[in-house]
Image: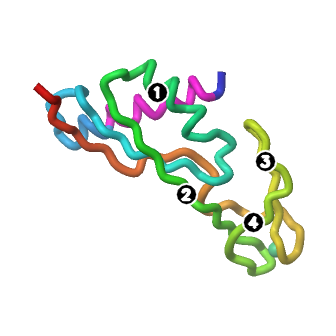
């Protein structure tokens, strides 16, 4: 289960960050997740797994646009040839080579915060 392992690593990373930032507990965390355009997984697919792991947390997401650098000098949006579950194929729109993806290829944690529970 791809989503399950991504969700688990997100939660682990958030807890590590929370400790680093001196949070008193792991309760009521709000997490902003950046999901790359070419990440091969969507927030909608991840959310149920995240919610199962941490029912008390609030998860929000933001799409991170894909940006690639190619050896031909091209910098920008790659041409996506195929986007399916867990599989993304892209090429440089200028020369057709497989460029290096600089951004938008993975799932990252953009920010974490803690909200006050409603009494
Ligand atoms: Zn190129």
Label 2 element class: strand
Give, as a single range, the part of the protein colored magenta.
3-16
Give the label on residue 64, or none.
2
Give the label on residue 83, or none.
3
Which residue is found at the position 42% from the left and 20% from the top?
A: 53
Compare marks 3 and 1 and give the one earlier in the sequence. Answer: 1
What is the x, y in percent for residue 43? Answer: 55, 39
Compare marks 2 and 1 and give the one earlier in the sequence. Answer: 1
In which quadrant is the C terminus drawn?
top left
Front: mark 4 or 3: 3
Q: Is mark 4 within 8 Å of ligand 1?
A: no
Report which quarter residue 74 is drawn in: bottom right
The main secondary structure of the magenta stretch is helix
Mark 4 sits on what residue?
78
Give the label on residue 103, or none.
none
Residues under labels 2 and 3: Cα distance? 16 Å
Residue lying furthest top? 52
Give the label on residue 50, or none.
1
What is the x, y in percent for residue 71? Answer: 78, 74
Compare marks 4 and 3 and give the one earlier in the sequence. Answer: 4
Answer whether labels 2 and 3 touch (C-beta < 8 Å).
no
Residues under labels 3 and 1: Cα distance? 23 Å
Along the line of sight, which residue is nearer the eye, 77 or 97?
77
Compare marks 2 and 3 and give the one earlier in the sequence. Answer: 2
Label 3 element class: strand
In which quadrant is the N terminus drawn?
top right
Left or right: 109, with 6 as reference point: left
Along the line of sight, which residue is nearer the eye, 46 or 100?
46
Q: State how the image is colored.
A: rainbow
Residues under labels 4 and 3: Cα distance? 12 Å
Residues under labels 4 and 2: Cα distance? 13 Å
Q: Quadrant of ligand 1?
A: bottom right
């Amino acid at each position: 289960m791809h989503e399950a392992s991504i969700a688990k690593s997100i939660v682990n990373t958030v807890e590590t960050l929370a400790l680093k930032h001196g949070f008193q507990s792991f309760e009521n965390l709000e997490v902003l997740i950046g999901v790359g355009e070419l990440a091969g997984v969507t927030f909608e697919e991840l959310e149920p797994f995240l919610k199962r792991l941490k029912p008390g947390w609030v998860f929000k997401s933001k799409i991170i646009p894909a940006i690639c650098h190619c050896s031909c000098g091209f910098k920008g949006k790659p041409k996506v040839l195929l986007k399916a579950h867990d599989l993304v194929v892209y090429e440089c729109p200028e020369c057709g080579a497989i460029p290096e993806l600089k951004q938008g290829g993975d799932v990252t944690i953009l920010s974490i915060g803690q909200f006050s529970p409603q009494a």
